[in-house]
Amino acid sequence: MKIPIAKALFNSHSYSEYRKLISDLLLEKKSTGDEQSEDLTHYSELNETRMNRLDKTIKITEETSLKLKSLQSEYIWLVISEGWCGDAAQLLPIINKSAIESGKIDLRIVLRDENEELIKLFLTNKKKAIPILIVVDKETGSVLGNWGPRPQAAADLVADYRKEFGVIDETLKTNLQLWYLHDKGITTQNELADIMLELER
């Protein structure tokens, strides 16, 4: 096992611990991460509401359920996240439900800013984009693959917008949230299940 992975797992949170950490910080008007600002706290508050809703409404499809339940080996999904990250708020409830559905995956979450060594191993276009899901073989501790920071269609939406307008602004953030809303987590659960089946081949 790579040392940054082992270190991260040692300091990782379960999904419920991660949710509690964010809630407790919000009571102090704080967000996770090294940087503190009114904006980041505001995003964390929005994200908490979003995650509460998604925890209640996200459904794993029958097709995905069958795929996840067919896994033979046991895995850890180590997710790098932060409470203020809009994509993480949309994706973690789906990731959590998928892990539970499989019966073979243990979900652990770590904060990006507390795991500098780790995030540097999983940069996206040289940036510390999150969330990143790292697939770890539970038995050997070896890294088998990774996914993130967004499902492909959402990544394409961001790339196309950036190409046309040269920025990531509030309009794009709204468009992205609408994409997630309409998608209802289907694309994400499909991609994750397919990655796992691919790894078992």
Image: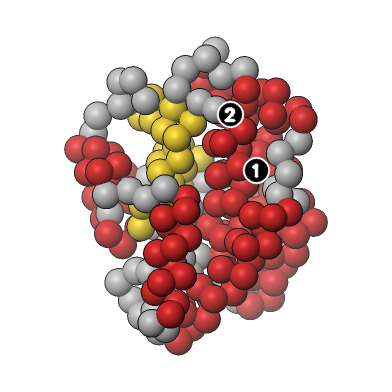
Q: Nearer the viewer, residue 113 or 77?
A: 77
Q: Secondary structure at mark 2?
A: helix
Q: Secondary structure at mark 1?
A: helix
Given contact means CB atoms under 8 Å apart, are the residues at marks 2 and 1 in contact?
Answer: no
Name the spot of residue 193 as percent of width and height, x first.
62, 30
148, above or below 111, in the image: above
181, above or below 105, in the image: below
**100 with respect to 110 (left or right):** right
Instruction: Look at label 1 and name its amino acid.
Output: Thr
Q: Which mark is residue 86?
A: none
The quarter of the displayed image where residue 139 is located:
top left
**32 with respect to 95 (left or right):** left
How dense is the environment of label 2, judged by Cα within 10 Å: few (below 14), some, or many (20 and up)? many
Name the spot of residue 151 as percent of width and height, x first.
62, 46
Q: Earlier in the sequence, mark 2 or mark 1?
A: 2
Position of the C terminus by quadrant: top right
**38 with respect to 12 (left or right):** right
Q: Which mark is residue 188?
A: 1
Name the spot of residue 101 as percent of width and height, x first.
61, 33
Q: Farthest right residue? A: 182
Position of the N terminus by quadrant: top left
Query: Residue at position x 31%, y 62% from top?
Result: 113
Query: Residue at position x 30%, y 26% from top?
Result: 141
Q: Farthest left residue? A: 3
22, above or below 131, in the image: below
87, above or below 3, in the image: below
Query: Residue at position x 62%, y 47% from top?
Result: 94
How dense is the environment of label 1, judged by Cα within 10 Å: few (below 14), some, or many (20 and up)? many
Q: Nearer the viewer, residue 90 or 105?
A: 105
What's the colour scheme?
secondary structure
Query: Residue at position x 68%, y 35% from top?
Result: 190
- Residue bearing mark 2: 102
